[in-house]
């Protein structure tokens, strides 16, 4: 007997037929003698509908009332899944965020889970009841409804698993696992059996959007074994195994790859400030106002001073923040003292990720050589302990991902390819 | 300064534009210095959508989970109205059923309000905040969500007004008040300035569906002054007065009419059992099994025994219960010992209602004479202290209502007619 949290996203909950399929899958885990808590999203499209109502009502909506409105989508699907489970003979009940309760910060619209009271829930599970829990919602200290921000149901599921000391947190999504890279770009991409929390975090943060980044960070912190698997392949009642996200110590040496995955991200924009005075404090005067505006600067290169006392500074920001960044920088022009501001959104960030990097030198140079051989110019580089990212011209994205996938030996054998 | 409860139905809440109109109307009461609580329904059509989800999920749905699902519609509109009020400078917040809380029985799907805690609410109102309260929902003893049954938001509003000791409970609907009869049948029907609780109860119970019957009963018990008025006529910002529902003592003698209104109801079916043994206990053996099945029998006539030892018994039941009634009676045929069961749904009940009846004789005979002169045959009669109802052939419904409206002097003057 194990204690399992199962999480189903909006596509899996879109309509009663699909909710019935979810119920059937939950029933199998329950029949196997497991204690099961299910965390559900709202029906696909419902949260958008509710968010739009709030925006229509006021562009400056009160986030406390926004939370009252948008949390209702998960309330509906939890009640419906409980009904669908009962209909096939599985005792079940819904537990709303305020009923458990799931205590959160009072950061309405993007609250953080502080504590989950599992007393009543444990009694219910011991009684062989399946618990159905709306994701995304919680309760702030003033007894008001909160939500965790978009994609928050993944975080709800991991937090539930941690609080319940669950053996596993199964996240059912519309992909069947984590791949070495985007299979739409590289048909010979392979599904990973295991990936470490750290790798998953780096992959998620650079555009492989399988799980919400926050949920992976929480899983790592709380040591929750997370499995990503598909809610759709299961026609004969057998679930195909997905990808387990685990601690590094669980991955055996034999299994360990140098590089685990290759990610790409087209949502960055490059800004270059020319003729910045080459003196102490100049760089701080650029990035301090951006930080104050809450804009996340990623890659930074400061060129060697090309003429007496001045230099160019290049960096990237999320494309969505480009207009605001330009505004912030222009207003600080006097203080920074730059010449021109040049920006470019036709860039892409390509990242190689793998914990194997820690113990191997020369990983990055393979990347630079491989791209260089194809005439792909590297505009910026950033590295972390288990990741190397380069900024290139957007048009080369697919080519770069494909050649790197081959160069690092990630291609599936010919006969295993899709 | 007064303390007011305003209630808006689903049509008034259908979409952000209408919610904005509601907010504007609430603002006027608030700006006049009043303390205002607003009770809202779900957007028109939303409760049906949610109920259908539950039915689709299981025909035998758990009413506790049904309540979780269907109560979400009012949660959405309360949050949105709070946002819309804030957008026009009115401080407002939503109070969900479990937040106040509104304590109810545990009769899920049709719970009854037991007690409303107004401590937090009063503090908020004293602080010049408008309270927005979802109708239809409450909280049972086990901290689970309940709903009050369809149309329950009227009851929520009256209960809130009673708990808050409000000066007035204004129910905004898609009609602009209570009329002497259905204006679609009698164009010269007049809007009543005042009607007593008792009259309103009788009118509601015989088909003038302006307010949910339960809410009128509660208003009478708690002595809440209820006003019915339109949410739509108000183009120049001035609200047209509607109909006040008040205690009998508030209606002056000058104002008092013999008959206040004429109602009709086509949702009754007539059943006749022939050759029922004319002996003690025979009638009880007919109505006991119907009562056990929860079927509400209305008008009853036992004909004079037409031949030795047997008689015909005629009565009406709601059309919706006809099939079940036939089934119940056929199964009890041995015990009752009737000959044939004849049924007829092509009947209508016409009722004259008025507290003036108490002090005037001859009211009913005017009704019988008027109908007789038009050749309308009366199939059954029932009376209460302030109501006389007759059962007639359905085809004569409109004619009967029209001639009675004239006979009792209810027609508006020619020049005031619509």
Image (tube, coloured by chain):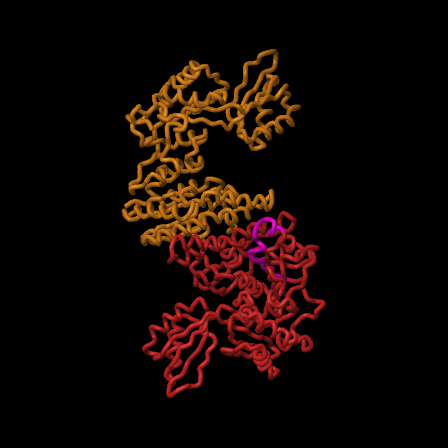
Chain colours: A orange, B red
Q: Residue placed farthest to the front in the image? A: B375
B284 lies left or right of A255: right
Q: Residue furthest right?
A: B415
Task: Name the residue located 50 percent from the left edge and 28 percent from the top edge.
Answer: A267
Closer to the camera, A257 or A232?
A232
**Total count of labels:** 0
- B395 to A291, vertically: above or below: below
Position of B339 with respect to B228 (left or right) is left
Near-viewer residue (B341 or B373): B373
Residue B218 visible, this angle: no
A379 relative to A79, above or below: above
Quarter in which the N terminus of chain B is drawn:
bottom right
Say if the magenta span includes residue B327.
no
> Quadrant of residue B2 in the image?
bottom right
Residue positioned 64% across, 21% down in the render: A337
Q: Position of residue B355 (x, y in %)?
A: 60, 77
Query: Which quadrant does the C terminus of chain B fall into?
Result: bottom right
Residue A29 seen in this snapshot: yes
The answer to which image quadrant residue B370 occupies is: bottom right
Q: Residue furthest top?
A: A307
Residue located at (40% from left, 77% from top)? B273
User: Is A384 positioned to the left or the right of A68 in the image?
Assistant: left
Return the residue nearer the eye: B32 or A163.
Answer: B32
Q: Is residue B7 magenta?
A: yes
Which region shows up in magenta?
A: B3-20
Q: Quadrant of residue B400?
A: bottom right
Residue placed most toward the observer, B357 or B363: B363
Residue B46 image position (x, y, % from top left): 50, 53
Please tell me whether residue A171 is drawn above or below residue B187 in the rendered image.
Answer: above
- Tell me where residue A317 appears, x and y as whole percent: 54, 27
Q: Quick check: A353 above or below B349?
A: above
Image location of residue B234, percent across then percent down: 67, 57
């Amino acid at each position: 007997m194990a204690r399992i949290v199962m999480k189903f996203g909006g596509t899996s909950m879109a309509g009663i037929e699909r909710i019935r399929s979810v119920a059937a899958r939950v029933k199998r885990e329950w029949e196997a003698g497991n204690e099961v808590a299910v965390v559900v999203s709202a029906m696909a499209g419902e949260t958008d509908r509710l968010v739009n109502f709030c925006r229509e009502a006021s562009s400056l909506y009160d986030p406390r009332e926004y939370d009252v409105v948008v949390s209702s989508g998960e309330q509906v699907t939890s009640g419906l899944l409980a009904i669908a489970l009962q209909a096939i003979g599985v005792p079940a009940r819904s537990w709303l965020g305020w009923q458990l309760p799931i205590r959160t910060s009072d950061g309405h619209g993007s609250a953080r889970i502080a504590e989950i009271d599992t007393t009543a829930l444990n009694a219910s599970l011991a009684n062989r009841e399946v618990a159905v829990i709306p994701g995304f919602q919680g309760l702030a200290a003033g007894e008001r409804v909160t939500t965790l921000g978009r994609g928050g149901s993944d975080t709800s599921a991991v937090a539930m698993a941690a609080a319940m000391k669950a053996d596993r947190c199964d996240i059912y999504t519309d992909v069947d696992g984590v791949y070495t890279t985007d299979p739409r770009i590289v048909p010979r991409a392979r599904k990973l059996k295991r990936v470490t929390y750290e790798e998953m975090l780096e992959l998620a943060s650079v555009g492989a959007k399988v799980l919400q980044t926050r949920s992976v960070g929480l899983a790592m912190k709380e040591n929750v074994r997370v499995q990503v698997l598909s809610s759709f392949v299961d026609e004969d009642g057998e679930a195909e195994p997905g990808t387990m996200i685990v601690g590094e110590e669980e991955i055996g040496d034999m299994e360990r790859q140098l590089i685990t995955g290759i990610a790409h991200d087209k949502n960055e924009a490059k800004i270059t400030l020319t003729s910045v005075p080459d003196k102490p404090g100049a760089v701080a005067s650029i990035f301090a106002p951006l930080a104050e505006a809450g804009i996340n600067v990623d890659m930074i290169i400061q060129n060697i001073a090309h003429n007496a006392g001045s230099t160019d500074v290049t960096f990237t920001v999320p494309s969505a923040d480009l207009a605001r960044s330009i505004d912030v920088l222009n207003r600080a022009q006097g203080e920074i003292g730059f010449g021109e501001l040049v920006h470019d959104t036709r860039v892409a960030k390509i990242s190689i990720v793998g914990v194997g990097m820690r113990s191997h030198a020369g990983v990055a140079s393979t990347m630079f050589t491989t791209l260089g051989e194809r005439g792909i110019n590297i505009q910026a580089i950033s590295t972390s302990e288990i990741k190397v990212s380069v900024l290139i011209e957007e048009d080369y994205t697919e080519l770069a991902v494909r050649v790197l996938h081959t160069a690092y030996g990630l291609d599936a054998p010919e006969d295993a390819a899709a």
